[in-house]
Image (cartoon, grey):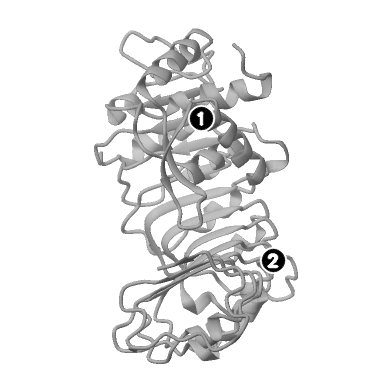
């Protein structure tokens, strides 16, 4: 009751997660934004409110990144059940059970088990705003059930099907025009359907197990996109005579190196976090010369996916805005220090597995690594 009014909604929302289970702070902030809680969709504001709730004891930190920022957190059980009591009384959030007859006055629903049983129920509710599946079971969803679900809940802003497995992009999903946050698990999907480009309000698209080797040109029309999270995604070249950009996109993981061309990266003006994974040597020319187009890039992860080639770091042009850099499987033969020490803002540098095969690391400049705090 002592919380400032603006923090109450963020606090009560925590009960959509299981007690004492690790929560990605990136995901939590994205959900707050998708729900419309955060003014101007500002991630900085979301992180500030997160720290406020940590300071007041509602959330505990479980993991921090190398630079010190919070990576994961959890809600203590005692806090969780107190919040859940308030949430259910006010019908702010509901965890349905067999005794629940209707979702007519509920805006947010989450389930911990029996996903298929819930989806197969006939619901007449037209106002459900958020649906999150936290079941640990990898249920296999029938397409007809997905289609009926999309028909019943037309006003969803948040849809997270969690670990539930689909065979293909679910029919009817393209009609959820208000959708801002979407998480799917379609391991066999290789091509993003054109229909997804009708979701013009979409801000976050999560398919962590998705390996997408073809995306439609229409993705460049999705101007509100902020986060793309895939195992791998290939972006198409922008349509001819199309000068616009994905001006709100700030997070991409993992971009295929074939998409790292000046024409594509120059149209991602606000990207701050980028993970590139694939055969870096095969696409060496494009990747090495295009990264400097990302003037606001702060965190870069390079993962070489080919064992037959090596990366030549000295030919790369990194933007001076870089704060964190991580290299994996790059099999460098030359000492990376003389080049990397010139990055003026670099604070965290990670040379991970098979990143460097040499035996010497030497800083040669007198003022090298002026901001470095962490070296792994």
Residue 154 visible at all: no
Q: Which residue is mark 2?
A: 269
**Quadrant of the frame with the C terminus:** bottom left
Query: Residue 305's image quarter?
Result: bottom left
Q: Nearer the viewer, mark 1 or mark 2?
A: 2
Report crowding for label 1: few under 14, some 14 to 19, many 20 or more residues within 10 A (C-alpha).
many
| Residue that numbered label 1 is attached to | 130
Using the image as rendered, state which of residue 345 and residue 30 is in the foreground: 345
Q: Report the disc number at residue 215.
A: none
Q: Position of residue 364 (x, y in %)?
A: 54, 89
Residue 207 horizontal side relative to residue 194, left or right: left
Q: Is residue 182 visible?
A: yes
Whether 261 is drawn above or below 276: the answer is: below
Residue 356: image location, x then y, percent? 36, 83
Above-or-below relation of 328 to 157: below
Q: Give the residue displayed 28% in from the left and 27% down from the top.
A: 113
- Give how far across and how far down residue 4 sits, in percent: 67, 20
Give coordinates of residue 257: x percent, y percent.
Answer: 48, 77
Q: CA distance from mark 1 to mark 2?
A: 30 Å
Question: Which quadrant is the N terminus positioned in?
Answer: top right
* Picture quadrant where residue 126 is located: top right
Q: Is 332 placed left or right of 142 in the picture?
A: right
Q: Left of 322 or right of it: where is 207?
A: left
Q: Which residue occupies 43% across, 13% down?
A: 82
């Amino acid at each position: 009751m002592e919380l400032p009014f603006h923090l109450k909604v963020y606090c009560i929302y925590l009960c959509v997660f299981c007690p004492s289970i690790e929560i990605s702070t990136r995901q939590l902030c994205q959900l707050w934004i998708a729900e419309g809680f955060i003014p101007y969709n500002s991630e900085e504001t979301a992180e500030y409110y997160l720290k406020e709730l940590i300071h007041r004891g509602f959330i505990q930190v479980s993991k921090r990144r190398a630079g010190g920022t919070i990576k994961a957190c959890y809600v203590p059980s005692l806090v969780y059940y107190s919040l859940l009591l308030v949430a259910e009384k006010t019908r702010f959030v509901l965890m349905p059970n067999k005794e629940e007859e209707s979702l007519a006055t509920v805006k947010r629903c989450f389930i911990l088990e029996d996903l298929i049983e819930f989806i197969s129920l006939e619901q007449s509710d037209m106002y459900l705003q958020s649906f999150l599946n936290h079941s640990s079971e990898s249920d296999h969803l029938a397409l007809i059930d997905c289609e009926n679900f999309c028909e019943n809940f037309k006003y969803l802003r948040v849809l997270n099907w969690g670990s539930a497995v689909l065979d293909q992009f679910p029919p009817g999903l393209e009609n959820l025009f208000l959708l801002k946050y979407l998480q799917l698990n379609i391991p066999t999907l290789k091509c993003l359907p054109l229909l997804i480009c009708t979701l013009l309000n979409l801000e976050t698209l999560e398919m962590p197990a998705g390996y997408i080797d073809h995306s439609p040109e229409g993705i460049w029309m999705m101007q509100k996109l902020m986060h793309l999270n895939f195992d791998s995604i290939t972006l198409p070249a922008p349509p001819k005579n199309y000068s616009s950009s994905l001006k709100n996109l700030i997070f991409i993981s993992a971009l295929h190196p074939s998409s790292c061309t000046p024409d594509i990266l120059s149209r991602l003006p606000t990207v701050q976090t980028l993970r590139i994974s694939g055969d870096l040597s095969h696409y060496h020319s494009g990747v090495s010369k295009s990264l400097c187009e990302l003037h606001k890039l702060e965190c870069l992860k390079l993962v070489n996916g080919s064992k037959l080639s090596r990366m030549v770091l000295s030919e790369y042009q990194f933007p001076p805005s870089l704060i964190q850099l991580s290299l994996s499987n790059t099999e460098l033969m030359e000492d990376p220090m003389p080049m990397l020490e010139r990055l003026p803002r670099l604070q965290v540098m990670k040379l991970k597995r098979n990143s460097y095969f040499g035996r010497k690391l030497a800083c040669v400049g007198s003022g090298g690594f002026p901001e470095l705090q962490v070296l792994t």
